[in-house]
Image (cartoon, rainbow, N blue to C red):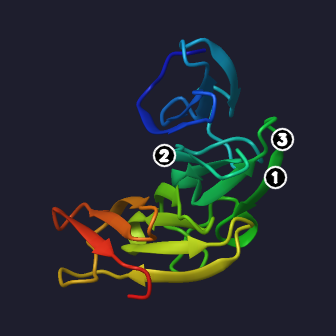
Amino acid sequence: AGQFSAPGGVAVGRDGELYVADFYGQRVQVLKPDGAFIRQWGTTGRTSHAVGSFYYPTDVALDRTDNVYVADGYGNRIQAFGPDGAFLRKWGGPLARGVYGPFNGWFMTVTSIDFGAEGNLFAADFYNHRVQKFSPNGTFLTRFGGKGKGPGQFDHAIAVAVAQDGTVFVADFGNNRIEKWRPGN
């Protein structure tokens, strides 16, 4: 507890708790501001597609009500948990059990997640070269991007961040750039 094996995404709770996606540790840890261990989701070092387990988690984000959302990278899904740690929902591919694909709401390695001001979740879909937007309950809303080098295209979207005004910034890994998307574009 409190140690990591390739920590990835980090989120900070209202009281300063630190939520850390532990990539090779196959878990998400929650720590107090002083670093003391609180809890974890997942079984240390064990991959699984079961509810509450992970297959290389890459990022974590908190919504307005302190629900915890985890980008389960190679599990090709997103899982959500309540502030008390209880499982809420999952989505991505059929039954959200690791099946990848190019369809709306499916992933080919979800690498980063962030919430917009309206409460919708944006997810970087790495091998599909796009960003997908979902309602907090996992309903697919839209997607943008696509494989390429031109404006509005990505060569592996690896990270996403959403500003208060709704502007979406995407780290375009293969094109060595950051793209900026404004609401309505």
Task: Determine the residue positioned at 48% across, 60% down.
Answer: 109
Say whether residue 103 is visible.
no
Residue denoted by label 3: 86
Nearer to us of marks 3 and 2 is 3
> Gap between marks 3 and 2, in whole Å?
20 Å
Would residue 141 be found to the left or right of residue 138 on screen?
left
Task: Determine the residue positioned at 57% across, 48% down.
Answer: 61
Residue denoted by label 1: 88
Q: Quadrant of the N terminus?
A: top right
Farthest residue toward the bottom?
185
User: What's under tag 2, amino acid-wise?
Assistant: Thr
Residue denoted by label 2: 58
Determine the image quadrant of residue 160. Answer: bottom left
Determine the image quadrant of residue 55. Answer: top right
Q: Looking at the image, is 80 positioned above or below residue 176?
A: above
Determine the image quadrant of residue 185. Answer: bottom left
**What is the crowding at mark 2: few (fewer than 14 residues within 10 Å), some, or many (at least 20)?**
many
Q: Do the residues labelled 3 and 1 touch (CB within 8 Å)?
A: yes
